Amino acid sequence: MTLDDLAGQVGTAPSQLSLIENGHREPRLTLLQAIATALGVELATLLDAEPPSRRDGLEIALDAAQRGPLYAALGLPRVRAGKRLPTEALEALVGLHTELARRSSEASATPEEARRANTELRRAMRARDNYLEEIEDAAEALLVTVGYSSGPLTHRTVEQLVSHLGFSLHHARDLPSSTRTVTDLEHGRIYLPPASLPGGHGLRSLALQAVAHRVLGHTHPGTYADFLRQRLEISYFAACVLMPRHAATEFLLAAKRNRDLAVEDLRDAFGVTHESAAHRFTNLATSQLGITVHFARVGRDGTLYKGYENDDVDFPTDVTGAIEGQTVCRHWTSRTVFDHNDLAGEFHQYTDTPSGTYWCSAQTGQGADGDFSVTLGVPFAAAKWFRGRESTSRSVSRCPDPTCCREPSADLTAKWRGAAWPSAKLHTHILGALPSGTFPGVDDAEVYAFLEAHAPR
């Protein structure tokens, strides 16, 4: 049957069918049904992702590879997978493309490329005020299905959401070491580590991040940048479900009217961690409250682990523009908070910097890498909306001027130069190479063995 024959039977132009056949246009469901009827097959047959034969699968794989940017960048002609092309040659070509993609992925997983990818993603989120409306909408639509209204999301409600999406939750002590969770797509099971058993924050967030891949239509990441974007999106989705836009915005607007905004209140109202609440505040601060803001997670030694800003605070950067692994000023709230004995509550401070005066609120915590602080800051003019604005703590930062806090005073230099030999600590998590091979560094053999052992019989 020619395209002209089929077009006449389904009532469309041959050129439109050609576009559909070659993957340039998505067909309407009514047209697909008409095509299925004309071909004498079930509609499900046309929607089946499994190729009819191995040869068909190889042809599809070769076509997809040659359409991709990696092959296009080589400037080579396309090979047509016609009937005269031997299957052995087709297999060799697909194998070469697969290896080319693997090596390209491996090459991009270097510290420099990772920092560049992180920088691009941070800039993209800054341009959107750290607000992703499409994910907010998806989360709210999902919450409607379980009748959520307000307050902390219970573990039971999370289980209902997961069940609504066709999955069930299971805990396993032998999860592969390279994974956070493992999802069995065939049997609809999500495996979580035992540390996230009910009673903590982990189960809800990990479970929601696992199903977020399905909700957001993620496919296997082809580059480290894709992996980072997906991680950001699933974390964002989990936060949207745990602190829904409508409920969180109402809570924050009421606090703003009372000039009593506080991260710790948002944390307690929705039963999440302080860091999660601070992150979520940055999503809603500009889009819903009209307040520009910055966020930072900083180690006791001043290492900046995470950061976001749209209020022009001057984070330190390297030559690639990355902020991760840089050292923040000793006089910033993120570091002075460690100088105070009462670390149970939030610490507030005004800091004068070359880019303006900022009011910041910080709280400390302890993780696998040691003590850290979580800081949320706003320009001086916005401090009037926050609890703690009456703070008398104030500091001055002249960074990036090295005389601010990076160079010793002349007296100390004269006394100790040549008489001291410190041994520097190596930040292996910043300088070490990233895992090579299949993104995102997951050990496939270990995962498949795990699923084989746990799959229902």
Image (spheres, rainbow, N blue to C red):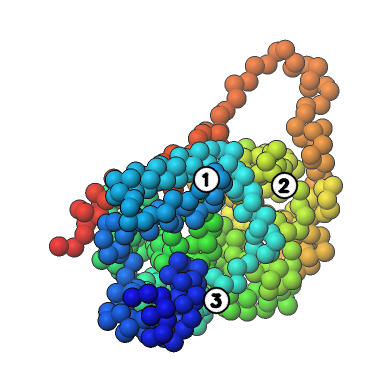
On residue 76, which mark appears?
A: 1
Is residue 313 left or right of 250 when viewed as pictured? right
Q: As shown in the figure, which amino acid type bears the numbered disc 3?
A: Asp
Is residue 361 left or right of 312 when viewed as pictured? left
Q: Quadrant of residue 309?
A: bottom right
Q: As shown in the figure, which amino acid type bears the numbered disc 1?
A: Leu
Question: If you read the primary sequence from the N terminus, does the residue marked by circle 1 or circle 3 appear first?
Answer: 1
**The one of 70 and 230 positioned closer to us in this rendering:** 70
On residue 173, which mark appears?
A: none
Q: Quadrant of the N terminus?
A: bottom left
**The one of 169 and 372 positioned closer to us in this rendering:** 169
Identified at 71% across, 72% down, the residue is: 289
Dot 3 alpha-carbon crowd within 10 angstroms: few under 14, some 14 to 19, many 20 or more: some
Question: If you read the primary sequence from the N terminus, does the residue marked by circle 2 or circle 1 appear first?
Answer: 1
Q: Which residue is mark 2?
A: 315
**The one of 162 and 55 positioned closer to us in this rendering:** 55
Q: Which residue is mark 3?
A: 137
Q: Quadrant of the C terminus?
A: bottom left
Question: If you read the primary sequence from the N terminus, does the residue marked by circle 3 or circle 2 appear first?
Answer: 3
